[in-house]
């Protein structure tokens, strides 16, 4: 339930993305000959004149293309095995698996800071991030293909030696050199290796299986946690612009409201967390099972209420006067700065949307 805030220099961001693919005019000519009339009309309407244009088309255009794209037609042999799909002519231009998938993932990792990839854009519950793995950690634990492909200076033969060597000994740079597994020159190169990894998935908001021409489009990708992408959403279709975190019209963050109701008595207070929304957003809430998932974290909301009772503004003013610390700084320390500072985006911390709503009650 977090809108993706793209970099201010959107043009450079998009140009960097297009460089992953290097689509050529000749490829567009061959592709354009195969597209259906309904899709061609949308291309003309939105001035999509190349494969590169399609890569960075805004989400509202992608949605139109998805809705207009013809259903897949399949031919099978006598044994029921698929021998032809009408989507085959598109898939070869928009293959997501393999190198493209890896390069797109690297692109989002490279831009993780400007995109503030910290919490899942669909749920704002689970954390997502990119991180750096130390070369020494890989030397001690990585499999053959990772060692030879990811660590500078380590080829296939050296990777085999390292794997055999570490069976009986924990690897340090010093013992690698002393036991002549790697030379000092190669160790220096290894130390300078920078290996990026990530803890997020990229969801195709509009399922690529039903519209393969959108499988590489930048604004069809939503960085998300594994649960939202694979367990809950899968290939579900949420076919409204205001339901995609990549859309300028996204409004789930404002359409959803969290409330905490007191169901106990004055002595033994018991609370129940409610998620309220309009009918337009209900499909989104049900798809990602948000009510049940947030209900599990009800204690977070209760803690906000308890802190408000324990630290009313009058008490915080007394503390500020006594300690000589600004009022807002103390409040930030107690509740969390992200609850008050609107310059801190919701995606920078998990549960920020929930906490802000409860604090306003």
Image: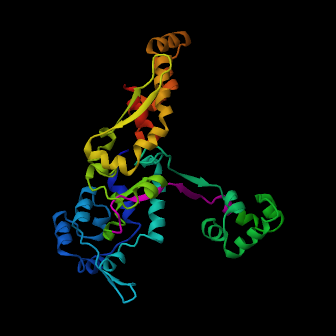
Question: What is the span of residues highlighted in magenta in the rendered image?
Answer: 188-209
Q: In the image, what residue occupies the spot 46% across and 48% down?
A: 117
Pick the front one: 317 or 71? 71
* Residue 89 placement, left or right of 168: left
Q: Is residue 197 magenta?
A: yes
Q: Quadrant of the C terminus?
A: top left
Question: Looking at this view, is 177 or 172 the one in front?
Answer: 172
Write the residue at 45% across / 28% down: 271
Residue 262 lies left or right of residue 56; in this view the side is right
Position in image of residue 291 (x %, y %): 40, 42
Residue 59 in which image quadrant = bottom left
Residue 252 image-quadrant placement: top left
Q: Where 113 sits versus 145, above or below?
A: above
Residue 143 visible: yes
Residue at screen point 48% across, 28% down = 302
Residue 149 image position (x, y, % from top left): 60, 69
Picture quarter with the N terminus: top left
Residue 304: image x %, image y %? Answer: 47, 26
- What residue lies at 37% left-to-right and 71% top-to-bottom? 22
Q: Is residue 296 left or right of residue 150?
A: left
Where does the image place residue 31, in percent across and percent down from the top left?
Answer: 28, 78
Colouring method of the image: rainbow
Residue 100 magenta: no
Q: Is residue 167 above or below residue 292?
A: below
Q: Is residue 6 among what the camera can see? A: no
In the figure, is residue 228 to the left or right of 33?
Answer: right
């Amino acid at each position: 339930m977090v809108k993706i805030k793209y970099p201010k220099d959107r043009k450079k961001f998009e140009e960097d993305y297009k460089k992953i693919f290097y689509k050529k005019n000749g490829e567009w000519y061959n592709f354009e000959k195969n597209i259906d009339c309904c899709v061609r009309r949308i291309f003309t309407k939105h001035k999509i004149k190349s494969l590169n244009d399609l890569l960075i088309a805004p989400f509202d255009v992608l949605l139109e293309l998805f809705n207009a794209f013809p259903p897949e037609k399949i031919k099978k042999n006598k044994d029921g095995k698929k021998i032809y799909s009408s989507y085959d002519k598109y898939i070869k231009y928009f293959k997501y698996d393999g190198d493209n998938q890896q390069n797109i993932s690297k692109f989002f990792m490279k831009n993780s800071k400007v995109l503030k990839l910290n919490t899942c854009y669909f749920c704002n519950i689970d954390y997502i991030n990119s991180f750096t793995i130390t070369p020494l950690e890989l030397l001690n634990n990585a499999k053959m293909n990772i060692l030879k492909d990811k660590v500078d200076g380590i080829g296939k033969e050296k990777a085999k030696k390292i794997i055999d060597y570490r069976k009986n000994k924990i690897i340090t740079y010093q013992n690698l050199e002393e036991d002549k597994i790697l030379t000092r020159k190669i160790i220096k190169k290894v130390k300078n290796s920078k290996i990026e990894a990530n803890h997020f998935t990229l969801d195709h908001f509009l399922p690529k299986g039903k519209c393969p021409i959108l499988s590489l489009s930048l604004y069809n990708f939503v960085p998300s946690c594994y649960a939202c992408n694979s367990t809950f959403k899968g290939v579900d279709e949420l076919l409204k612009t205001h339901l995609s975190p990549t859309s300028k019209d996204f409004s789930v963050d404002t359409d959803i409201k969290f409330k905490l109701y007191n169901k106990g008595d004055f002595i033994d207070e018991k609370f129940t967390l409610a998620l309220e929304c309009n009918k337009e957003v209900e499909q989104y809430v049900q798809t990602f099972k948000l009510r049940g998932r947030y209900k599990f974290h009800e204690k977070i909301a209760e803690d906000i209420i308890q802190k408000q009772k324990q630290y009313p503004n009058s008490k915080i003013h007394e503390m500020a006067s006594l300690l000589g610390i600004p009022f807002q700084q103390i409040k930030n320390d107690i509740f969390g700065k992200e609850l008050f500072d609107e310059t801190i985006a919701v995606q920078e911390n998990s549960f920020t949307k929930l906490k802000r709503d409860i604090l306003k009650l």
